[in-house]
Image (cartoon, grey):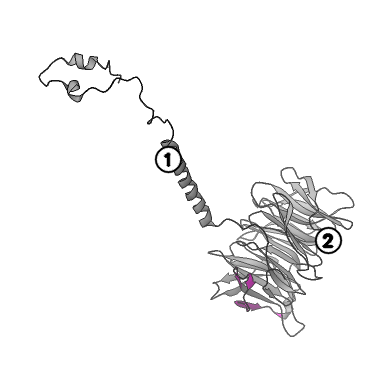
């Protein structure tokens, strides 16, 4: 497998955890093993040098049998709060403490989401001010954080929620349904804004907003028969402006990198492809990463060109992407210093080899008189004769 470093097991969900100083952790949700072992959350450290997770979890939280299996999970942008959904116990909130040496998970109350049923999707807004949940029953909710004030509570938003995503400015929420429809919501007041247009034989399945801050686009996978394309909508008009066929097979999951440079697709038979958004061309392709299994989680590392993928059959896999390396901070400073030095050298060479203002030779100018002739006899009062030889002094 690409990138090495995998943890086998019945993993049903997972996500990255951003910590200070560019430290990244991974949280995995594992299902029950019959009646012998309940569901549990595990947090692992990540080594960017080896592109692997730690061999054992830093901390583990064991859920009760009555909660059932873990369905989905989301981590707050701060890395301090984790929300997960279960098949029978509603949603759970955990506060994450410490670092790699003293990691802890503390369960907290999440009363508005305790008895809401399984949630297929959970998402935090980019600025961390809102959280949205989409249920298998089609119920869509948006809450304000940290007050948990209800912004949207729509029981019949969809037949069954399939996917959703917040826009970069946290102003919009896009949601898709298992019936092929897609809707846009205003997150400030929960008002439905529009429904994306599609042909009668098309199903809009997955959705992700652009993240680079310059191109206000919404990417959606559109299935038409056995053909799947990645379509693009302009969010200023909500008009469809084009499409491209990237992954030539049914898609199960889609993701965008935090800097918006890359878009990733995972297939239902275990492949992934990563495309550069600027060109919409494939930059990385991994075949049979999860052989024969539908990829459930596909998420970019916050600081490295690495993706986390999970399937129930193969567990979690870390994959290092074969894409051009990003500039490091020290490299940028070195480039700026080099450019400054090169400019200084070029200026010096130009100065030495050109007729600059200071280097223009003086032509047709009388020879400078002897200093004594200029000053004259200290006892002489004939100053007019001295100044007269040079003319009037232009001040």
Return the residue nearer the eye: 23 or 340: 340
Determine the image quadrant of residue 18. bottom right
Q: Where is residue 155 in the image (x, y as percent from the top left)?
A: 78, 59
Q: Kindly give the residue lying farthest to the bottom in the view shown.
A: 36
Query: How far apart, in angstroms, are the residues tagged by discs 2 and 1?
Result: 62 Å
| Residue at figure coordinates x 82%, y 47% from the top left | 197
Query: Which is nearer the eye, 335 or 8?
Result: 335
Residue assigned mark 1? 348
Instruction: Tell me the magenta residue range.
Output: 45-64
The quadrant of the image that shows the C terminus is: top left
| Nearest to the observer: residue 141 or residue 33 | 33
Are the two marked residues, 2 and 1, in contact with CB atoms closer than 8 angstroms? no
Q: Is residue 228 visible?
A: yes
The residue furthest left is 379
Q: Is mark 1 on a helix, strand or loop?
A: helix
Q: Can residue 114 be seen in this view?
A: no
Task: Bin the neighbour count of mark 1 within 10 Å (Cα to Cα): few under 14, some 14-19, many 20 and up.
Answer: few
**Residue 102 vertical placement versus 73 (above, below):** below
Q: In which quarter of the image is residue 252?
A: bottom right
Identify which residue, 203 or 171, lies in the foreground: 203
Question: Whole-percent x and y of residue 84?
Answer: 69, 69
Task: Single out the mark in the foreground, 2 or 1.
Answer: 1
Q: Does the magenta stretch include residue 357?
A: no
Measuring from the top left, give residue 15's x and y in whole percent: 67, 67
Q: Earlier in the sequence, mark 2 or mark 1?
A: 2
Residue identified by numbered label 2: 250
Q: In this view, does 81 lie to the left or right of 64?
A: left
Q: Which residue is drawn at 87% across and 53% down?
A: 202
Residue 334 circle label: none
């Amino acid at each position: 497998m690409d990138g090495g470093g995998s943890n086998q097991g019945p993993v049903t969900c997972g996500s990255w955890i951003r910590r200070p100083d560019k430290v990244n952790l991974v949280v995995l949700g594992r299902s029950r093993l019959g009646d012998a072992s309940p569901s549990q959350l595990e947090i692992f450290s990540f080594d960017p040098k080896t592109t692997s997770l730690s061999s054992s979890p830093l901390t583990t939280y064991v859920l009760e049998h009555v909660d059932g299996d873990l369905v989905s999970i989301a981590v707050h942008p701060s890395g301090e709060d984790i929300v997960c959904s279960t098949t029978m116990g509603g949603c759970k909130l955990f506060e994450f403490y410490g670092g790699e040496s003293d990691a802890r998970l503390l369960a907290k109350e999440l009363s508005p989401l305790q008895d809401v049923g399984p949630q297929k999707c959970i998402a935090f807004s980019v600025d961390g001010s809102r959280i949205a949940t989409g249920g298998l029953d089609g119920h869509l909710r948006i809450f304000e954080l940290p007050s948990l004030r209800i912004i949207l509570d729509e029981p019949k938003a969809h037949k069954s929620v399939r996917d959703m995503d917040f826009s970069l400015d946290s102003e919009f929420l896009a949601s898709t349904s298992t019936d092929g429809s897609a809707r846009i919501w205003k997150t400030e007041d929960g008002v439905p804004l529009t429904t994306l247009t599609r042909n009668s034989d098309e199903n809009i399945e997955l959705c992700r907003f652009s993240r680079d801050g310059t191109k206000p686009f919404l990417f959606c996978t559109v299935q038409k028969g056995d053909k799947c394309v990645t379509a693009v909508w302009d969010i200023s008009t909500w008009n469809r402006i084009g499409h491209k066929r990237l992954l030539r097979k049914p898609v199960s999951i889609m993701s965008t990198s935090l800097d918006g440079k890359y878009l990733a697709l995972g297939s239902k038979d275990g492949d992934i492809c990563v495309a550069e958004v600027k060109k919409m061309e494939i930059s990385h392709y991994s075949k049979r990463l999860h052989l024969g299994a539908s990829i459930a989680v596909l998420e970019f590392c916050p600081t490295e060109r690495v993706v986390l993928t999970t399937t129930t059959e193969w567990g979690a896999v870390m994959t290092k992407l074969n894409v051009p390396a990003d500039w490091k901070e020290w490299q940028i400073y070195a480039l700026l210093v080099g450019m400054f030095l090169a400019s200084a050298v070029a200026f010096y060479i130009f100065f030495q080899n050109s007729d600059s203002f200071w280097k223009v030779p003086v032509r047709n100018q009388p020879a400078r008189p002897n200093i004594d002739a200029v000053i004259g006899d200290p006892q002489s009062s004939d100053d007019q004769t001295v100044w007269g030889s040079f003319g009037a002094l232009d001040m």
